[in-house]
Image: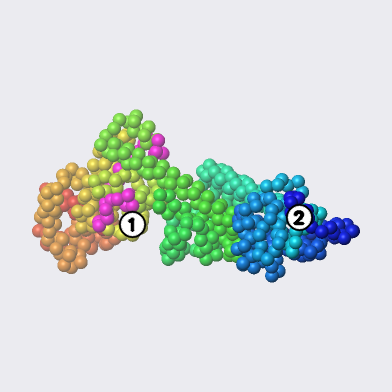
């Protein structure tokens, strides 16, 4: 403190200094209870007048890097701020005199904590004035007041820092607890996800993928799990409550499900089921659902569903890829067998795709009117053959489905099965004769084509025909020869055919059975289901209508051949 502030002032009455010190001690306790710097400053300002003939002109507190006038009752006016601001800020942390209009002595006391260096940034300023210059002891008292105020402000700041530190510490502790809780949740989620991944990986490794996935999801979630194909057909159910019989797929429901899945990649509720869609490269392969009528499934269940769909999609895509590869290998094998390949290679390649070429094989050619022999057509034919228990290799060739069948197939049964698969009976099947080695397969294939062609050109073009049943057609060529052979039939049987057509007669069939019975009346009558006398009458009528002598050997031969061809052409259905 400066001793030049007022050495010439009048001495205080005896005991006044002691009284002031007692008051400062009392003030010290009050200042230490201040809640903040503003309250401490106002309290110190109010005690200035109690210590002597002085008054408080202004108080300053730091704000934004400079000292700012702090309102103290009505003393701090705008005019006061303009008068003092630059003077106080210019003291640079030192105590010093300031000029105030109408006051002989004015002093700015820096409010500094004990131990604070002169010139360091103070906690504030207290500006005091007097009508005359105080003596050194008076200035010392005011300086002590300033130090007490600075100490109280330092205490307030320390307590505030302690509170802030405690708050920060509490916040940090809470943040730490929250972080540990989040970490625990993340660890739990990761552990659960790892368990889901491991469980589903184990399920797909068993080979029974769809059932394995359904049971794994059921075990992980506790909900009944359902796997359906892309059409809504049940593939697997795990858990209680499986409907019996399972409801038929609703195309509208499936379409809506697909639309919902496109809009929202997360599992969606469809009725009382939480359903996720298994997709691979944009193609929907099936669905996995949880039966959840209460809507209780959460994020974990959704994750299990999503991961199950991923596993299902990958496995189904893999199986499809394998199936397509096997189908391609089968087609290539059939092509090579038809065009000719060595037996050893044929046996090995057939075994690789699960077909045994050892033993009797028959080639089958299938053609359907109005249907292209595409993959769907070939698959329908293969499905029909499999449904009959036939072991076969199936391929597409020259607009037809071609089968290499182990053993002899029943033509009409296969025709009806294919008709049911395709939803149409407008087709024909040709069956080649037996071949006992791969080297004979090209010949059986040509025979199957021959049988198919004959059937398609006959009067009953829909059905099955075996090459072994072609009779004379086995030695008759194709193409224009059909017109020749049909002309031959008309030449020998024309009048009889016309008569049967006009009168719903049965003369041509009678003649055919007569020849097949070797001219035996009893055998022919029995085959026709008529009396012997009726047979004699019909033979007499066909002699009259056809003009043929059945006793002539050459005539009998031509008529017999004509009836055989007539049967092959579908005359006897």
- Badge 1 vs badge 2, beta-carbon distance below 8 Å: no
Numbered range of the magenta stretch: 352-378
| Residue to which mark 1 is pinned | 422
Give the numbered dot on residue 197.
none
Residue occupying the point 22% across, 53% down: 456
How far from the left and from the top, in percent, is residue 172? 68, 50
The question of residue 470 being in magenta is answered with: no
Please identify, in this view, whether the residue under mark 1 or under mark 2 is nearer the observer: 2
Q: Residues within 10 Å of mark 1 (few under 14, many from 20)?
A: some
* Image location of residue 211, percent across then percent down: 53, 50
Q: Is residue 313 above or below residue 535?
A: above
Q: In the orientation shown, which residue stands out farthest toward the right?
A: 15
Where is mark 2, residue-wise? 6
How far apart are labels 1 and 2 at the CA level? 123 Å
For the C terminus, give its image quadrant.
bottom left
Which of marks 2 and 1 precedes in the sequence?
2
**Kind of element beneath mark 1:** helix
User: Is 353 one of the magenta-colored residues?
Assistant: yes
Left or right: residue 467 versus residue 5 is left
């Amino acid at each position: 403190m400066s001793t030049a502030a007022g050495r010439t002032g009048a001495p205080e009455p005896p005991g006044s200094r002691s009284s002031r010190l007692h008051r400062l001690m009392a003030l010290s306790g009050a200042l230490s209870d201040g809640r903040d710097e503003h309250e401490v400053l106002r309290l110190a300002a109010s005690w200035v007048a109690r210590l002597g003939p002085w008054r408080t002109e202004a108080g300053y507190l730091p704000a934004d890097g400079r000292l700012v006038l702090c309102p103290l009752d009505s003393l701090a006016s705008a005019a006061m701020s303009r008068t003092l601001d630059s003077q106080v800020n210019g003291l640079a942390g030192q105590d010093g005199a300031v000029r105030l209009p109408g006051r002989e002595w004015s002093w700015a006391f820096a409010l500094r904590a004990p131990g604070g260096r002169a010139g360091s940034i103070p906690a504030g300023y207290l500006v005091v004035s007097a009508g005359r210059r105080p003596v050194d002891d008076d200035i010392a008292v005011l300086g002590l007041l300033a130090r007490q105020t600075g100490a109280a402000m330092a205490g307030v700041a320390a307590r505030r820092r302690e509170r802030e530190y405690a708050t920060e510490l509490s916040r940090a502790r809470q943040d730490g607890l929250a972080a540990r809780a989040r970490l625990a949740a993340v660890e739990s989620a990761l552990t659960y996800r790892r368990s889901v991944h491991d469980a589903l990986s184990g399920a797909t490794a068993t080979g029974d993928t769809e059932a394995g996935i359904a049971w794994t999801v059921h075990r992980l979630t506790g909900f009944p799990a359902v796997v359906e194909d892309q059409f809504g057909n049940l593939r697997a159910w795990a858990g209680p409550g499986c409907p019996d019989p399972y409801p038929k797929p609703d195309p509208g429901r499936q379409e809506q499900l697909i639309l919902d899945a496109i809009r929202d990649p997360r599992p969606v509720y469809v009725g009382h089921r939480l359903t996720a869609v298994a997709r691979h490269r944009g193609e929907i392969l099936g669905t996995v659902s949880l039966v959840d009528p209460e809507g209780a499934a959460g994020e974990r269940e959704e994750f299990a569903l999503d991961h199950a769909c991923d596993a299902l999609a990958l496995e189904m895509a893999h199986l499809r890829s394998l199936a397509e590869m096997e189908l391609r290998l089968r087609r290539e094998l059939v092509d090579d067998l038809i065009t000719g390949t060595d037996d050893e290679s044929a046996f090995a390649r057939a075994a690789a795709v699960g077909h045994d070429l050892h033993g009797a094989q028959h080639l089958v050619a299938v053609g359907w009117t109005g249907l292209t022999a595409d993959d769907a057509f070939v698959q329908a034919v293969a499905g029909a053959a499999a449904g009959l228990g036939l072991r076969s290799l199936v391929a597409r060739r020259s607009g037809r489905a071609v089968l290499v069948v182990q053993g002899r197939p029943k033509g009409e049964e296969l025709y009806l099965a294919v008709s049911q698969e395709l939803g149409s009976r407008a087709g024909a099947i040709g069956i080649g004769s037996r071949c006992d080695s791969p080297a004979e397969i090209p010949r059986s294939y040509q025979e199957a084509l021959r049988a198919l062609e004959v059937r398609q050109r006959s009067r009953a073009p829909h059905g099955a025909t075996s090459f072994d049943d072609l009779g004379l057609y086995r030695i008759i060529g194709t193409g224009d020869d059909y017109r020749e052979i049909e002309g031959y039939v008309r030449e020998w049987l024309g009048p009889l055919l016309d008569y049967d057509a006009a009168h719903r007669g049965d003369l041509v069939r009678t003649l055919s059975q007569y020849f097949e019975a070797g001219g035996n009346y009893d055998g022919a009558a029995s085959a026709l289901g008529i009396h012997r006398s009726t047979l004699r009458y019909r033979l007499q009528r066909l002699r009259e209508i056809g003009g043929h002598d059945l006793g002539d050997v050459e005539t009998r031969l031509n008529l017999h051949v004509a009836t055989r061809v007539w049967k092959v052409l579908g005359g006897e259905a």
